[in-house]
Structure formats: structure tokens, C-alpha cells
Image (spheres, helix red, strand yellow):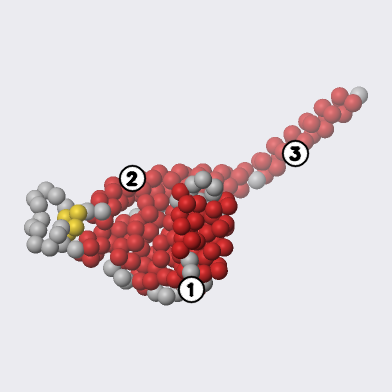
């Protein structure tokens, strides 16, 4: 009896489902079309972004080579077939132009994010701190925590150059509290201690050096922290 009731209930439920499906067939078709369209758009977007990323990656490699190209000594002529520049400023100007072109041509790609970071570095080399801030702040807000950490670290240097020490201190503390592979806790700590030294906040600097020694025994970082602490007056 229980099996019969169960079978009957199952059949009735199935009949109701079929009836509902017939009544709402047009709506289901619309929903199905929308779902297919969304999936297709997502796959198409994924394919498009990956294709764009591949193109951008090649251009980024070229731009990084420019950023790292040889700077000729005064009076030395350029050598055929070898990329070189007469000054750091000339090299940074050329590289920044290439990095910015990648950001403009390939938005929303991972490579464009990297180019944004490098554009900030190039701007900093040119002492264009306003542009450096804009680019590095954008890169610092990215989901890629490794790249974001690098950007914050570079941005802290820009703030220091601008005498915005409070902002730099805040970034170093953030990096020390949430270390990454690209910017370790000890790296952020040593930079923060160095900044405190420049501000003549020697007590704060010494505390950090002692913390580094305690947390990193028998390491090069501990030895460096010990030497710096000993040099404090």
C-alpha cells in the first residue's frame, strides 16, 4: 500500500510537472536562450581576454626590455642592433610610453595590470610623482595580491620622495601585517625602520630591529637589523 501511494504521488507529481512545462514552454524557451547566451558570452569573453592577454604579453616583454636597456656613458654612440639610451630619463620616457599603450589597448587583462605597475615605476624614475601615484594606486587596488603588494611598496617610496611620510608608514604597516611572496614581512619592517630613522624616531626604529632579530634568528635580515640597531645613537 505504501509503495502504491508513493507511486501514485510520484506519477501525479510528474503529471503536474509535465502540465506546468507545457503551459510555460515559451517562458522556458526564453530562459534557455538567455542561459545559453550568457554562457556563450562568458566563454567568448574568456577567449577574447585570453587572446588579448597573449598579444599584450608580447608587448610587455618588449617594454620591460626597454625599461632595462643599456644606458650609454656620455659621448658613447648607439650601437647598431642594440637598444640603448643616452640617459635614464630618455629610457624611462620610452618605456612609459610603451607601458601606457598596453594599458590603453588591452584593458581588463592581467598584462595591462602589470603594465600599470611598470608605468608607475617609470613615472617615478622621471620624478613625475603625480603620474606615479595614479598608476601605483590603481595597481595597489588590484585583486592580484602579489602585484598589489609590489605596487604598495613602490608607492611608499614615491610618498617618501614627496615627504608624505604618514602615508608611507601606513603602507609599510599594511605590508608587514599582510606579507606576500613579493613583499615579505621583514622587507616591509626594515623599510619602515629606515623611515623612522630618517625621521629621528630612533626608539621606534630600534623596536622594529629588535623584532626582526627575534623573529628571524640566524638570518641575513637579523644580522642587518643588528648592525642598524647598533649604529643608532
Q: Which residue is mark 3?
A: 16
Q: Residue at x 36, y 67 (%)?
A: 132
Q: Which residue is mark 1?
A: 200
Label 2 residue SS: helix
Q: Residue at x 16, y 52 (%)?
A: 83
- Whether residue 124 is visible, yes or no, is yes
Q: Which residue is mark 2?
A: 54
Relative placement, left or right, of 43 versus 63 is right
- Whether residue 192 is visible, yes or no, is no
Label 3 residue SS: helix
Residue 150 drawn at (x, y percent) = 43, 56
Tell me the CA gap for discs 2 and 1: 49 Å
Tell me the CA gap for discs 1 and 3: 80 Å
Q: Residue at x 11, y 48 (%)?
A: 81
Q: CB under 8 Å between callouts 3 and 2?
A: no
Residue 160 drawn at (x, y percent) = 42, 70
Residue 136, image quadrant = bottom left
Which is more N-terminal, label 2 or label 3?
A: 3
Relative placement, left or right, of 117 versus 214 is left
Q: Quadrant of the N terminus?
A: top right
Residue 4 drawn at (x, y percent) = 86, 25
Amino acid at each position: 500500500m505504501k509503495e502504491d501511494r508513493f507511486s501514485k504521488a510520484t506519477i501525479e507529481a510528474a503529471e503536474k510537472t509535465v502540465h506546468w512545462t507545457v503551459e510555460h514552454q515559451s517562458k522556458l524557451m526564453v530562459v534557455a536562450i538567455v542561459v545559453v547566451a550568457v554562457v556563450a558570452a562568458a566563454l567568448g569573453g574568456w577567449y577574447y581576454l585570453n587572446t588579448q592577454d597573449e598579444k599584450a604579453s608580447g608587448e610587455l616583454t618588449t617594454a620591460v626590455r626597454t625599461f632595462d636597456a643599456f644606458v650609454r656613458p656620455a659621448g658613447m654612440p648607439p650601437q647598431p642592433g642594440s637598444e640603448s639610451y643616452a640617459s635614464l630619463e630618455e629610457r624611462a620616457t620610452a618605456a612609459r610610453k610603451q607601458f601606457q599603450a598596453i594599458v590603453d589597448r588591452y584593458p581588463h587583462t592581467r598584462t595591462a595590470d602589470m603594465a600599470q605597475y611598470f608605468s608607475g615605476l617609470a613615472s617615478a624614475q622621471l620624478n613625475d610623482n603625480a603620474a606615479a601615484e595614479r598608476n601605483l594606486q590603481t595597481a595597489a587596488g588590484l585583486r592580484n595580491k602579489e602585484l598589489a603588494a609590489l605596487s604598495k611598496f613602490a608607492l611608499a617610496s614615491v610618498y617618501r620622495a614627496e615627504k608624505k611620510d604618514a602615508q608611507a608608514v601606513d603602507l609599510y604597516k599594511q605590508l608587514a601585517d599582510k606579507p606576500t611572496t613579493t613583499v615579505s614581512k621583514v622587507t616591509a619592517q626594515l623599510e619602515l625602520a629606515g623611515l623612522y630613522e630618517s625621521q629621528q624616531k630612533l626608539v621606534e626604529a630600534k623596536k622594529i630591529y629588535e623584532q626582526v632579530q627575534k623573529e628571524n634568528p640566524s638570518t641575513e635580515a637579523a644580522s642587518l637589523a643588528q648592525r642598524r640597531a647598533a649604529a643608532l645613537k
